[in-house]
Image (spheres, rainbow, N blue to C red):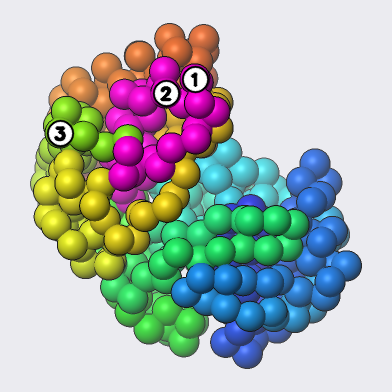
């Protein structure tokens, strides 16, 4: 299959390597302000990986020309932080073909809907088959230009859904070759609400803020950063996420239960479940607070979940407190910026019943 990967960060390089290793022709694109990985991949002709996935795999194209990356693509994987989803959609728009399969990976809270609204499409428009995954399929880090380390590839606990949901079966079939443990979700609300990043990352970051600033992130994010009290804050956020899902009739697992299913964790609890998790071992903390664990997981993910709660009448006081504290620490107004809300996802006018039917 001819595959286009839009994004060259940790996730994009992991996705591109894996699909190439599975025998697919892969092109990778990123914007000009992110030249390091695409330049290295182009120069060496591919991506090198260590860890659970090992080897060196050829990449057919790596660069800043999105038309070349998309040329002949049967599957498009938009793999980026939430802040780039709309920009990627806008850049790709002139080069898309009706009927193409497009997956925002991960959805990072309604990413597929943001992709569609950027293209000027209603949620039920079927011009392209657009969907999202519940999470990134890997724990992966770029270790050098064009080089990655894969700590874990998920064998379970990964789902995909299309919007409208009639396209889910086709997306599942397209992805299943590389992700055999992938399941078809009931809707993009299920993939969105199963996303654990806003549950974990902000809580651990905020309660380790001084250590991050003092050491430049020279500690293990999960092993050193999660204690019993940190776990209680994670649980507080997770309880609100589960309440949102229940109000919409969406089935999601608690974050520790999902972590065990995915293979990250062996204990289903909110403290040592994370700090002793084999799949998180050795993952370093971010070097500064200005990092996607706050800018994305609060500014996009948690703000969206809080806004969803307001719209359907489910209180989210713990999320709201984290949004306010993170805004103070970062000297910005995450809620006021409205980077990702029910409105930006095209959902602001929908009732609870209408949302449940998406």
The residue indicated by pointer 2 is 211
Neighbor class of circle 3 (other Cα within 10 Å; few <14, some 14-19, many 20+) is few
Q: How many marks?
A: 3
The disc placed on residue 87 is none
Q: Is residue 92 above or below residue 210?
A: below
In space, the residues marked 1 and 3 are separated at their CA atoms by 22 Å
Quadrant in the picture for the N terminus: bottom right
Neighbor class of circle 2 (other Cα within 10 Å; few <14, some 14-19, many 20+) is some
Q: Residue at x 85, y 67 (%)?
A: 42
In space, the residues marked 3 and 2 are separated at their CA atoms by 17 Å
Q: Is residue 153 above or below residue 135?
A: below
Q: Can the viewer see residue 165?
A: no
The image quadrant of residue 204 is top left
Report the span colored magenta: 195-224
| Left or right for 327, reference 143 | left
Q: Earlier in the sequence, mark 3 or mark 2?
A: 2
CB of mark 3 within 8 Å of CB of mark 2? Answer: no
The residue indicated by pointer 1 is 214
Q: Residue at x 28, y 66 (%)?
A: 262
Label 1 SS = helix
The image quadrant of residue 268 is bottom left
The residue indicated by pointer 3 is 228
Q: Position of residue 10 (x, y in %)?
A: 59, 55
Residue 20: say if magenta: no
Q: Position of residue 81 (x, y in %)?
A: 55, 45
């Amino acid at each position: 299959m001819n595959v286009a990967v839009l994004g060259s960060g940790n996730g994009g390089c992991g996705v591109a390597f894996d699909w190439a290793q599975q025998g697919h022709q892969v092109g990778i694109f990123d914007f000009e302000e992110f030249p390091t990985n695409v330049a290295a991949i182009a120069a060496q002709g591919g991506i090198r990986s260590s860890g659970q996935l090992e080897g060196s795999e050829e990449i057919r194209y790596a660069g800043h020309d999105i038309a070349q990356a998309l040329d002949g693509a049967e599957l498009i994987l938009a793999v980026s932080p939430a802040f780039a989803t709309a920009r990627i959609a806008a850049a790709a728009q002139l080069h898309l073909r009706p009927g193409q399969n497009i997956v925002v990976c991960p959805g990072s809270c309604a990413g597929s809907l943001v992709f569609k609204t950027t293209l000027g499409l209603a949620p039920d428009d079927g011009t392209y088959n657009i969907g999202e995954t519940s999470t990134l399929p890997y724990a992966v880090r770029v270790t050098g230009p064009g080089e990655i380390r894969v700590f874990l590839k998920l064998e379970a606990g990964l789902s995909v859904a299309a919007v409208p949901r009639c396209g889910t079966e086709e997306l599942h079939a397209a992805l299943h070759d590389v992700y055999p443990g992938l399941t078809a979700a009931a809707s993009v609300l299920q993939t969105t609400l199963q996303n654990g990043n806003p549950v974990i990352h902000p809580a651990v970051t905020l309660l380790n803020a001084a250590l991050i600033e003092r050491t430049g992130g020279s500690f293990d994010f999960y092993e050193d950063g999660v204690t019993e009290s940190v776990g209680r804050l994670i649980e507080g956020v997770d309880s609100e996420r589960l309440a949102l899902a229940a109000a919409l009739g969406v089935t999601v697992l608690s974050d520790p239960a999902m972590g065990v299913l995915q293979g990250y964790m062996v204990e289903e609890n909110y403290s040592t479940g994370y700090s002793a998790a084999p799949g998180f071992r050795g993952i370093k903390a971010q070097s500064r607070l200005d990092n996607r664990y706050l800018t994305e997981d609060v500014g996009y993910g948690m703000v969206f979940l809080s806004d969803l709660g307001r719209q359907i009448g489910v209180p989210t006081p713990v999320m709201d407190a984290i949004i306010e504290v993170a805004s103070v620490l970062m000297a910005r107004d995450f809620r006021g910026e409205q980077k990702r809300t029910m409105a930006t996802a095209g959902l602001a006018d929908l009732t609870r019943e209408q949302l449940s039917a998406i």
